[in-house]
Amino acid sequence: MFSRSRSVDEAPAWFTTALADKPEHAHVDVEGCAIHVRVWGARENPPLVLVHGGAAHSGWWDHIAPLLSSTHRIVALDLSGHGDSGTRNSYDLRRWSREVMAAAAAFSDGHPTIVGHSLGGWVTATAASQFGDQINSIVVVDSPLRDRAPEERHLSRRTPKAYRSKDEIVGRFRPVPAQQGVLPYVSAHIASESVRRTLKGWVWKFDPAIFGGHLPEQTPAEREVMEAMMNQMPCRVGYLRCEHGLVPPEMADVVRDILQLRGPFVDLVEAGHHPMLDQPLPLVATLRTLLEVWSIT
Protein backbone atom coordinates (compact mmCIF):
# COMPACT_ATOMS: atom_id res chain seq x y z
CA MET A 1 0.00 0.00 0.00
CA PHE A 2 1.21 3.50 -0.75
CA SER A 3 0.55 7.07 0.35
CA ARG A 4 -0.65 8.95 -2.70
CA SER A 5 0.54 12.40 -1.53
CA ARG A 6 3.98 11.13 -0.59
CA SER A 7 4.31 9.25 -3.88
CA VAL A 8 3.37 12.32 -5.92
CA ASP A 9 5.76 14.53 -3.93
CA GLU A 10 8.63 12.17 -4.78
CA ALA A 11 7.84 12.04 -8.50
CA PRO A 12 10.71 13.13 -10.77
CA ALA A 13 10.47 16.19 -13.00
CA TRP A 14 10.01 14.23 -16.23
CA PHE A 15 6.92 12.54 -14.78
CA THR A 16 5.23 15.68 -13.45
CA THR A 17 6.00 17.46 -16.74
CA ALA A 18 4.45 14.60 -18.71
CA LEU A 19 1.28 14.65 -16.59
CA ALA A 20 1.03 18.41 -17.04
CA ASP A 21 0.62 17.79 -20.78
CA LYS A 22 -3.09 17.08 -20.51
CA PRO A 23 -4.77 15.10 -23.28
CA GLU A 24 -7.90 15.98 -25.15
CA HIS A 25 -10.76 13.72 -24.01
CA ALA A 26 -13.41 12.64 -26.50
CA HIS A 27 -15.74 9.78 -27.42
CA VAL A 28 -16.49 7.96 -30.65
CA ASP A 29 -19.45 5.64 -31.23
CA VAL A 30 -18.40 2.18 -32.38
CA GLU A 31 -21.21 -0.24 -33.11
CA GLY A 32 -23.49 1.36 -30.56
CA CYS A 33 -20.93 1.77 -27.77
CA ALA A 34 -19.30 5.04 -26.67
CA ILE A 35 -15.53 4.58 -26.77
CA HIS A 36 -13.52 7.03 -24.66
CA VAL A 37 -10.28 8.35 -26.17
CA ARG A 38 -7.34 10.41 -24.94
CA VAL A 39 -5.47 12.37 -27.64
CA TRP A 40 -2.11 14.19 -27.63
CA GLY A 41 -0.11 15.92 -30.36
CA ALA A 42 -0.84 17.63 -33.66
CA ARG A 43 -3.27 15.97 -36.05
CA GLU A 44 -0.87 16.40 -38.98
CA ASN A 45 1.70 14.13 -37.28
CA PRO A 46 1.73 10.39 -38.07
CA PRO A 47 -0.75 8.47 -35.90
CA LEU A 48 0.34 6.25 -33.01
CA VAL A 49 -2.41 4.29 -31.24
CA LEU A 50 -1.82 2.92 -27.72
CA VAL A 51 -3.88 -0.08 -26.55
CA HIS A 52 -3.96 -0.97 -22.85
CA GLY A 53 -4.09 -4.41 -21.24
CA GLY A 54 -7.01 -6.21 -19.62
CA ALA A 55 -8.77 -4.36 -16.75
CA ALA A 56 -6.60 -1.31 -17.52
CA HIS A 57 -7.48 1.88 -19.43
CA SER A 58 -6.01 4.68 -21.52
CA GLY A 59 -4.73 6.49 -18.42
CA TRP A 60 -1.98 3.88 -18.13
CA TRP A 61 -0.32 5.81 -20.97
CA ASP A 62 -0.66 9.30 -19.40
CA HIS A 63 3.05 9.51 -18.57
CA ILE A 64 4.17 7.73 -21.77
CA ALA A 65 2.17 9.44 -24.51
CA PRO A 66 3.43 13.02 -23.93
CA LEU A 67 7.01 11.78 -24.42
CA LEU A 68 6.05 10.57 -27.90
CA SER A 69 3.70 13.38 -28.93
CA SER A 70 6.28 15.78 -30.39
CA THR A 71 6.59 13.53 -33.44
CA HIS A 72 3.27 11.63 -33.45
CA ARG A 73 -0.46 12.11 -33.01
CA ILE A 74 -1.17 9.89 -30.01
CA VAL A 75 -4.56 8.19 -29.69
CA ALA A 76 -5.11 6.08 -26.55
CA LEU A 77 -8.52 4.47 -26.21
CA ASP A 78 -10.44 2.66 -23.51
CA LEU A 79 -11.59 -0.62 -25.03
CA SER A 80 -15.28 -1.29 -24.42
CA GLY A 81 -15.83 -2.56 -20.89
CA HIS A 82 -12.79 -0.60 -19.68
CA GLY A 83 -12.11 2.85 -18.30
CA ASP A 84 -14.65 5.49 -19.30
CA SER A 85 -15.98 3.61 -22.33
CA GLY A 86 -19.37 1.96 -22.41
CA THR A 87 -20.08 -1.70 -21.78
CA ARG A 88 -21.40 -4.42 -24.10
CA ASN A 89 -23.37 -7.61 -23.69
CA SER A 90 -20.34 -9.56 -24.92
CA TYR A 91 -16.70 -8.89 -25.78
CA ASP A 92 -14.30 -10.35 -28.31
CA LEU A 93 -10.97 -9.55 -29.95
CA ARG A 94 -12.42 -8.71 -33.36
CA ARG A 95 -14.82 -6.10 -32.02
CA TRP A 96 -12.10 -4.58 -29.83
CA SER A 97 -9.85 -4.41 -32.91
CA ARG A 98 -12.59 -2.54 -34.79
CA GLU A 99 -12.76 -0.08 -31.89
CA VAL A 100 -9.01 0.52 -32.27
CA MET A 101 -9.32 1.21 -35.98
CA ALA A 102 -12.36 3.45 -35.50
CA ALA A 103 -10.60 5.52 -32.84
CA ALA A 104 -7.55 5.91 -35.09
CA ALA A 105 -9.70 7.01 -38.03
CA ALA A 106 -11.76 9.46 -35.95
CA PHE A 107 -8.86 11.29 -34.33
CA SER A 108 -5.91 10.99 -36.73
CA ASP A 109 -5.06 10.78 -40.41
CA GLY A 110 -3.07 8.15 -42.25
CA HIS A 111 -2.08 4.57 -41.51
CA PRO A 112 -1.43 4.18 -37.76
CA THR A 113 1.30 2.44 -35.85
CA ILE A 114 -0.41 0.49 -33.06
CA VAL A 115 1.23 -0.47 -29.76
CA GLY A 116 -0.62 -3.07 -27.69
CA HIS A 117 0.26 -4.32 -24.21
CA SER A 118 -0.76 -7.75 -22.86
CA LEU A 119 -4.42 -8.28 -23.85
CA GLY A 120 -3.96 -5.14 -25.96
CA GLY A 121 -1.23 -6.98 -27.86
CA TRP A 122 -3.77 -9.63 -28.83
CA VAL A 123 -6.20 -6.91 -29.88
CA THR A 124 -3.44 -5.30 -31.92
CA ALA A 125 -2.52 -8.61 -33.55
CA THR A 126 -6.17 -9.17 -34.41
CA ALA A 127 -6.36 -5.69 -35.96
CA ALA A 128 -3.30 -6.53 -38.04
CA SER A 129 -4.87 -9.79 -39.20
CA GLN A 130 -8.08 -7.98 -40.19
CA PHE A 131 -6.86 -4.58 -41.37
CA GLY A 132 -3.15 -5.08 -42.11
CA ASP A 133 -3.22 -3.05 -45.33
CA GLN A 134 -4.56 -0.06 -43.35
CA ILE A 135 -1.84 -0.22 -40.67
CA ASN A 136 1.71 1.12 -40.88
CA SER A 137 3.21 -1.13 -38.20
CA ILE A 138 2.44 -2.78 -34.88
CA VAL A 139 4.34 -3.31 -31.64
CA VAL A 140 3.30 -6.12 -29.29
CA VAL A 141 4.40 -5.66 -25.66
CA ASP A 142 4.83 -8.85 -23.58
CA SER A 143 1.78 -10.69 -24.93
CA PRO A 144 2.17 -14.46 -24.59
CA LEU A 145 1.70 -16.34 -27.84
CA ARG A 146 -1.21 -18.50 -26.73
CA ASP A 147 -2.81 -16.64 -23.82
CA ARG A 148 -4.93 -13.84 -25.26
CA ALA A 149 -6.02 -12.46 -21.87
CA PRO A 150 -3.31 -13.09 -19.25
CA GLU A 151 -5.36 -11.13 -16.72
CA GLU A 152 -8.42 -13.37 -17.05
CA ARG A 153 -7.38 -16.24 -14.80
CA HIS A 154 -6.46 -13.79 -12.02
CA LEU A 155 -9.51 -11.51 -12.18
CA SER A 156 -12.17 -14.15 -12.91
CA ARG A 157 -11.80 -15.41 -9.32
CA ARG A 158 -12.50 -12.00 -7.79
CA THR A 159 -15.93 -10.98 -6.53
CA PRO A 160 -16.78 -7.37 -7.53
CA LYS A 161 -16.83 -5.13 -4.49
CA ALA A 162 -17.67 -1.50 -3.78
CA TYR A 163 -15.47 0.44 -1.33
CA ARG A 164 -16.53 3.16 1.07
CA SER A 165 -13.93 5.74 0.05
CA LYS A 166 -11.60 6.55 -2.80
CA ASP A 167 -8.58 6.28 -0.50
CA GLU A 168 -9.61 2.76 0.48
CA ILE A 169 -9.97 1.44 -3.06
CA VAL A 170 -6.91 3.29 -4.39
CA GLY A 171 -4.88 1.81 -1.55
CA ARG A 172 -5.76 -1.68 -2.81
CA PHE A 173 -4.49 -1.06 -6.35
CA ARG A 174 -2.14 -3.79 -7.55
CA PRO A 175 -1.06 -4.71 -11.09
CA VAL A 176 -2.53 -7.94 -12.44
CA PRO A 177 -0.61 -10.15 -12.96
CA ALA A 178 1.49 -9.01 -9.98
CA GLN A 179 5.06 -7.80 -10.36
CA GLN A 180 7.91 -6.46 -8.25
CA GLY A 181 9.39 -2.98 -8.38
CA VAL A 182 6.44 -0.75 -9.28
CA LEU A 183 7.29 2.97 -9.21
CA PRO A 184 5.02 4.44 -6.50
CA TYR A 185 4.35 7.77 -8.21
CA VAL A 186 3.28 6.01 -11.42
CA SER A 187 1.14 3.56 -9.48
CA ALA A 188 -0.49 6.39 -7.51
CA HIS A 189 -1.55 8.23 -10.65
CA ILE A 190 -2.87 5.15 -12.45
CA ALA A 191 -4.72 3.94 -9.36
CA SER A 192 -6.46 7.29 -9.00
CA GLU A 193 -7.55 7.15 -12.64
CA SER A 194 -8.80 3.56 -12.31
CA VAL A 195 -11.82 4.12 -10.05
CA ARG A 196 -15.24 5.74 -10.19
CA ARG A 197 -17.91 6.57 -7.63
CA THR A 198 -21.31 4.87 -7.90
CA LEU A 199 -24.42 4.74 -5.71
CA LYS A 200 -23.00 1.59 -4.11
CA GLY A 201 -19.57 3.14 -3.44
CA TRP A 202 -16.20 3.29 -5.20
CA VAL A 203 -15.53 0.62 -7.85
CA TRP A 204 -12.88 -0.24 -10.43
CA LYS A 205 -13.38 1.09 -13.97
CA PHE A 206 -13.83 -2.18 -15.79
CA ASP A 207 -16.77 -4.44 -16.44
CA PRO A 208 -16.38 -7.59 -14.30
CA ALA A 209 -18.20 -9.53 -17.03
CA ILE A 210 -15.06 -9.37 -19.18
CA PHE A 211 -13.29 -11.71 -16.77
CA GLY A 212 -16.28 -13.61 -15.50
CA GLY A 213 -15.95 -16.48 -17.93
CA HIS A 214 -17.92 -14.66 -20.63
CA LEU A 215 -15.14 -14.26 -23.18
CA PRO A 216 -15.91 -16.85 -25.87
CA GLU A 217 -13.60 -19.81 -26.20
CA GLN A 218 -10.75 -19.23 -28.60
CA THR A 219 -11.12 -20.75 -32.03
CA PRO A 220 -8.12 -22.58 -33.55
CA ALA A 221 -7.57 -19.54 -35.76
CA GLU A 222 -7.45 -17.22 -32.72
CA ARG A 223 -4.97 -19.50 -30.96
CA GLU A 224 -2.65 -19.12 -33.92
CA VAL A 225 -3.25 -15.41 -34.57
CA MET A 226 0.01 -14.25 -32.96
CA GLU A 227 2.12 -16.57 -35.09
CA ALA A 228 0.00 -15.83 -38.15
CA MET A 229 0.32 -12.07 -37.88
CA MET A 230 4.09 -12.30 -37.60
CA ASN A 231 4.34 -14.58 -40.62
CA GLN A 232 1.68 -13.10 -42.88
CA MET A 233 0.80 -9.52 -41.96
CA PRO A 234 1.54 -6.88 -44.61
CA CYS A 235 2.43 -4.33 -41.92
CA ARG A 236 5.70 -4.22 -40.00
CA VAL A 237 5.90 -5.98 -36.66
CA GLY A 238 7.94 -5.29 -33.53
CA TYR A 239 7.91 -7.37 -30.34
CA LEU A 240 8.92 -6.11 -26.89
CA ARG A 241 9.49 -8.79 -24.28
CA CYS A 242 9.72 -7.84 -20.62
CA GLU A 243 12.55 -9.72 -18.91
CA HIS A 244 10.46 -10.50 -15.84
CA GLY A 245 7.14 -10.63 -17.66
CA LEU A 246 4.92 -13.39 -19.02
CA VAL A 247 7.02 -14.58 -21.96
CA PRO A 248 9.49 -17.25 -20.80
CA PRO A 249 12.83 -17.75 -22.61
CA GLU A 250 11.53 -20.76 -24.56
CA MET A 251 8.58 -18.77 -25.90
CA ALA A 252 10.90 -15.84 -26.63
CA ASP A 253 12.98 -18.12 -28.84
CA VAL A 254 9.83 -19.08 -30.75
CA VAL A 255 8.96 -15.42 -31.28
CA ARG A 256 12.48 -14.63 -32.50
CA ASP A 257 12.30 -17.54 -34.93
CA ILE A 258 8.92 -16.41 -36.25
CA LEU A 259 10.03 -12.81 -36.68
CA GLN A 260 13.44 -13.44 -38.25
CA LEU A 261 13.79 -10.45 -40.60
CA ARG A 262 10.16 -9.29 -40.37
CA GLY A 263 10.75 -6.99 -37.42
CA PRO A 264 12.80 -6.31 -34.29
CA PHE A 265 12.63 -8.35 -31.10
CA VAL A 266 13.64 -6.30 -28.05
CA ASP A 267 14.20 -7.47 -24.46
CA LEU A 268 13.35 -4.79 -21.91
CA VAL A 269 15.91 -5.48 -19.19
CA GLU A 270 14.58 -5.69 -15.60
CA ALA A 271 11.04 -4.91 -16.74
CA GLY A 272 8.04 -6.66 -15.25
CA HIS A 273 4.98 -7.50 -17.32
CA HIS A 274 3.76 -3.88 -17.02
CA PRO A 275 6.80 -1.84 -18.18
CA MET A 276 4.94 1.47 -17.91
CA LEU A 277 4.85 0.84 -14.14
CA ASP A 278 8.50 -0.05 -13.52
CA GLN A 279 10.56 0.84 -16.62
CA PRO A 280 8.67 3.70 -18.32
CA LEU A 281 11.70 5.55 -19.70
CA PRO A 282 13.32 2.45 -21.28
CA LEU A 283 9.90 1.72 -22.78
CA VAL A 284 9.72 5.23 -24.24
CA ALA A 285 13.30 5.04 -25.54
CA THR A 286 12.57 1.72 -27.25
CA LEU A 287 9.38 3.00 -28.87
CA ARG A 288 11.12 6.21 -30.00
CA THR A 289 13.90 4.17 -31.59
CA LEU A 290 11.49 1.86 -33.43
CA LEU A 291 9.42 4.79 -34.66
CA GLU A 292 12.51 6.67 -35.86
CA VAL A 293 13.96 3.65 -37.67
CA TRP A 294 10.63 2.83 -39.29
CA SER A 295 10.18 6.47 -40.38
CA ILE A 296 13.29 6.32 -42.57
CA THR A 297 13.06 2.75 -43.92
Image: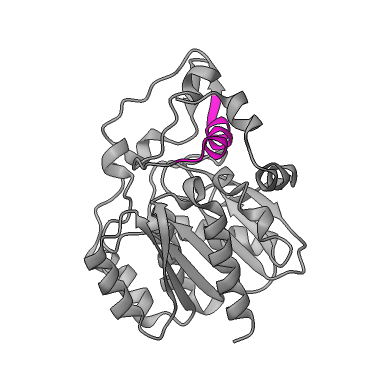
- Which residue sits at x=77%, y=62%? 42
Residue situated furthest top in the rendering: 164
Q: Quadrant of residue 43?
A: bottom right
Inspect the magenta stretch and tell me whether residue 152 lies in it: no
Q: Quadrant of the C terminus?
A: bottom right
**Is residue 212 visible from the viewing direction of this image?**
no
- 87 or 84: which is nearer to us? 84
- Which residue sits at x=51%, y=40%? 183
- Residue 55: where, in percent of width, then height? 43, 41
- Position above or below: 296 against 123: below
Q: Quadrant of the N terminus?
A: top left
How many numbered marks does the figure carry? Answer: 0
- Which residue sits at x=54%, y=23%? 3
- Position above or below: 197 against 116: above
**Is residue 48 visible from the viewing direction of this image?**
yes
The colour scheme of the drawn protein is one colour
Q: Quadrant of residue 219?
A: bottom left
Task: Look at the image and give the residue range highlighted in magenta.
Answer: 182-196
73 lies left or right of 150? right
- Which residue sits at x=45%, y=42%? 88
- Residue 149: where, in percent of width, then height? 33, 51
Q: Quadrant of residue 223?
A: bottom left
Looking at the magenta stretch, what is its main secondary structure?
helix
